Image (spheres, coloured by chain):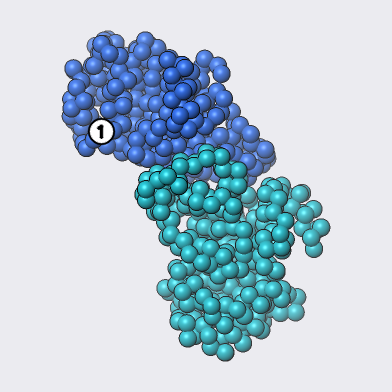
Chain colours: A blue, B cyan
Amino acid sequence: MTASLGSVSGHLVAIGGAEDRTSDLEILTRVFALAPADNHEVAVIATASGIPDQVLPDYEAAFTRLGASRIHSLDIKDRQQAGHPETVRLIEQSGVVFFTGGDQLRLTHVMGGSATLQAIRERLAAGAVVAGTSAGAAAMPGTMIYNGAAADALRKGAVNMTFGLGLAEGLIIDSHFLERGRFTRLMEVGASNPEHLGVGIGEDAGVIIHPHGIIEAIGSGHVILIDSRDLASSNIAELSMGEPVAIEHMILHALVSGHGFDLGARRYLVPEALEAVLANTL
Amino acid sequence: MTASLGSVSGHLVAIGGAEDRTSDLEILTRVFALAPADNHEVAVIATASGIPDQVLPDYEAAFTRLGASRIHSLDIKDRQQAGHPETVRLIEQSGVVFFTGGDQLRLTHVMGGSATLQAIRERLAAGAVVAGTSAGAAAMPGTMIYNGAAADALRKGAVNMTFGLGLAEGLIIDSHFLERGRFTRLMEVGASNPEHLGVGIGEDAGVIIHPHGIIEAIGSGHVILIDSRDLASSNIAELSMGEPVAIEHMILHALVSGHGFDLGARRYLVPEALEAVLANTL
C-alpha cells in the first residue's frame, strides 16, 4: 500500500448527492463528527452550484443543528475570489470544509491552482475533514469525470475527463450513480486505464476515505465499486471514436453502510473486517 | 456443460429493444438468416404490445424486405386465441417466430401453458429460430424479471420475478439495459441466487443463443454480462424487505458484436475464440 492512496492525510467524505439535509442528517452527522475535537467551524463552498442562494441556507441550518460554532458560507464565484486572502483565512480556521453540488467543471475552473484550494489541502493534511456532495465529490480525486453520455457511455471517447482537485489518489468518483445509471461511465474509464478504482456513489450515500486508503460506506444508499485491475482484454485501443467498447472481466462490488474496502489491497471489508482495519490504523 | 444451458435446441435471438427496423436491419437480417433453409415463413406475435396495430406493420415491412415468403401477424390477445388450432397451425409452418416488445407479464399471462407456446417450443427444437425484442427477450428464460425499481433495484425485494416462457435456461435476460441503467436489477437477482448468468441487452443489440450454450453478441449496442457465480458474500438473507443489498465480487463483461461467451464454461470469447467454438459445435 502506498502513502498516496486514498486521502492525502485527513478524512475525506465523498457523497453521491441528495443527502438528507433536513431529517436525521445521517451523513452530515458523520461528516461533522470527523472534525478535529477543538474546531467546529464549518466552511461551505458553493462554487459548483448555480443556485448558491438556495443551497447555502440548507447547509447553514443543517450544520447549525449539528453544533457548528461558526459557519462560513462561501459563494466563491470567480478566480479572484478564490485567491482572496480573507477567503483563505476563513478556510484556515475551519475544521470542516464542505463542497456543495452543481457543476464540477465550474468548481475546478474556479478553484484550480488557487490559494483557497492550497489552504484546503493544508487543512486536510493538518486533520480537518473535507467533504463534498455530487459535483463536490466527483471533483475530489486527481482526475475527474465532468461529462459523459447518459445512455451508453461505454463508447470510445464518450466520457470527458480532466484534472480534479487533487485531494485523493488511486480512484475516480462518480455521483448519483445508481439513480442515473452511470455504470458504463466507470467501465469506460476502467477500460481506458485499469489502475484506478471506480467509485460510484448513490444518492444519500457516501464514502469516508480514511487515511491509508481505507474506504467506509455511509448513508442509506449504495456505493458501487468497479475494479478493473484484473481486466483481461478490451478492444478500446483499436476502436474509432464512438465505437462500442468490449470488456472482459471487471470486478463489481456493492457496499452499504458499515462495509468497506481497502484500496491498496483491493480487498472488500465486511463490517467486522472494516472495524478491525480501522482500529489497527488509528 | 449441460445440455439444458442456452437454448433448448435451435437458435434463440434475444434483442434489447429498439432494433433498427427501417434502415440496414442488421439484427433482423441475422434473425432471418438463422431460419431453416427451406422455410422462410415468419410468425410475428404482438401479444406483449399495447399498440399491435403500429408494431405489426413495421415487422411485416422489414421481413418482407428480407425475403419472407409469408408473414403471419398474430395479434394474440387472450388465452382463447393462444389455444386456437389455427394459431397453432400457423406457428407449425413458420421457420421464424418473433415476439414483439411491450409487457412481458402480458405475454406470459396469455401464452403460458398454451398450445401455441408448446408449438413454439417444438418449432425451436426442430430447428426454427425464435426471436424476441424487449419484453419478448426478457420473457424467454425459465424465470424472468417483469418489474423492478428504476433508481436503485439493489434492495431486497425490489425486483419482481416469475416464470418465463421456458425457451432458455441458465440465464436471466434484461432489456434496454444500458439506456435505462438496469445494472442493479441483475445484481439483485445475482445476489438472490448466483447460479444464473445475468444478460443485460442494450438497445439495437442482441444475443444469438446458439445450441450448447454459446452466446454471440450482435447489433450496434452492448450486451452486459453479470456473472455472480463467484459471489464471495452478501447480506441479502439477513435484510428486511427494502434494505440495501451488499455484494462482494461479481464479474462484469461487456460484449460487442462478434464477441461471445460460453455459458457452461463461464468463459469470455473474443472473436477468434467465438469463431473457433462455433465451428466446432456445428
Residue at figure coordinates x 48%, y 28% from the top left: A273
Which quarter of the figure has residue A201? top left
Does any portion of residue A256 appear in the rendered image?
A: yes
Residue B20 lies, in percent from the top left, at 56, 63
Residue at position x 43%, y 56% from top? B159
- The quarter holding residue B220 reads bottom right
Residue at position x 25%, y 33% from top? Answer: A25
Q: Vertically, is A205 above or below B147?
A: above
Residue B272 vs residue B61: left or right?
right
Name the residue that disc number 1 marks. A25
Please count the marks in the image: 1
The quadrant of the rendering that contains the N terminus of chain A is: top right
Q: Nearer the viewer, residue A198 or A101?
A: A198
Q: Position of residue B143 (x, y in %)?
A: 53, 63
Question: What amino acid is found at the position of numbered circle 1 in the picture?
Answer: Leu
Most distant residue in the right direction: B280
Residue B55, given in percent of the width and then of the height, sits at 49, 73
> Chain under label 1?
A
Q: Compared with residue B217, is residue A140 higher up or lower down, i.e. above or below?
A: above
* In-image side of B123 versus B244 (left or right): right
> Where A20 falls versus A2 (above or below)?
below
- Residue B134 is at least partly visible in this image: no
Element type at mark 1: loop
Local crowd size for mark 1, using a 10 Å CA cut-off: few (<14), some (14–19), many (≥20): some
Q: Is residue A56 above or below residue B38?
A: above
> The C terminus of chain A is located in which quarter?
top left
Image point (51%, 77%), residue name: B111
| Residue A169 x, y percent position in the rendering | 49, 22
**Residue A172 located left or right of residue B279:** left
